[in-house]
Amino acid sequence: MKTIWLSLILVGIIFQANGQSTKPSSIQMDLIKKSDNQYKTGWILLGTGAALSITAIAIPNTYDYNDGSNNDTVRALLGWTGFLSIGTSIPFFLSAGQNARTAARLSLESQALMQPIPFPGQPNAFPSLSLKIPL
């Protein structure tokens, strides 16, 4: 009984295991999508930071002119949050550009396989991921 179960499991694993994918890799599309998401995140953080900073500048110093209470804490909180948000957007823009440039240099193509002695049934080419580095 154990051997039957073991053989069924092995046969199932053999049919499920693929040595090589038949569809091309989507590394370029993943990098482009990641770049778009980072670019969008950068713009959201930049816009939010600018809005918070402008709001901090627009708030008057005194809230109530009768008792003289001031808004320095609120202005400082909004100003620093806006400044940090703007500063946080910079790395998102930089990494989005880097990912877009990397996606432009990556390509999936078939490379010729140079064998000194060709064996029958062996492939003449194999899929490869190439990275072009401009010098």
Image (cartoon, grey):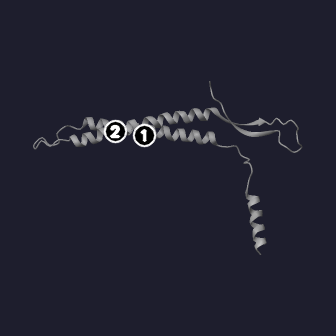
Residue at point 65% right, 30% down? 132
Q: Nearer the viewer, residue 15 or 24?
A: 15
Name the quarter where the N terminus is drawn. Answer: bottom right
Q: Position of residue 126 (x, y in %)?
A: 77, 40
Q: Where is residue 53 in the image (x, y as percent from the top left)?
A: 31, 36
* First in sequence: mark 2 vs mark 1: 1
Quadrant assignment, res 33:
top right
Q: Which of 75 and 112 is in front in this view?
A: 112
Q: In this view, does 122 lie above or below 93?
A: below
Q: Which of marks 2 and 1 is in front?
A: 2
Q: Name the residue under label 1.
A: 44
Q: What element carries label 1?
A: helix
Amino acid type, callout 2: Gly
Amino acid type, callout 1: Ile
User: In the drawing, does residue 51 fall left or right of residue 104?
Assistant: left
User: In the drawing, does residue 107 fall left or right of residue 38?
Assistant: right
Q: Is mark 2 on a helix, strand or loop?
A: helix
Quadrant assignment, res 52:
top left
Q: Which mark is residue 82?
A: 2
Q: Nearer the viewer, residue 1 or 24?
A: 1
Residue at point 78% right, 71% down? 3
Q: Where is residue 74 in the image (x, y as percent from the top left)?
A: 24, 43
Name the quarter where the C terminus is drawn. Answer: top right
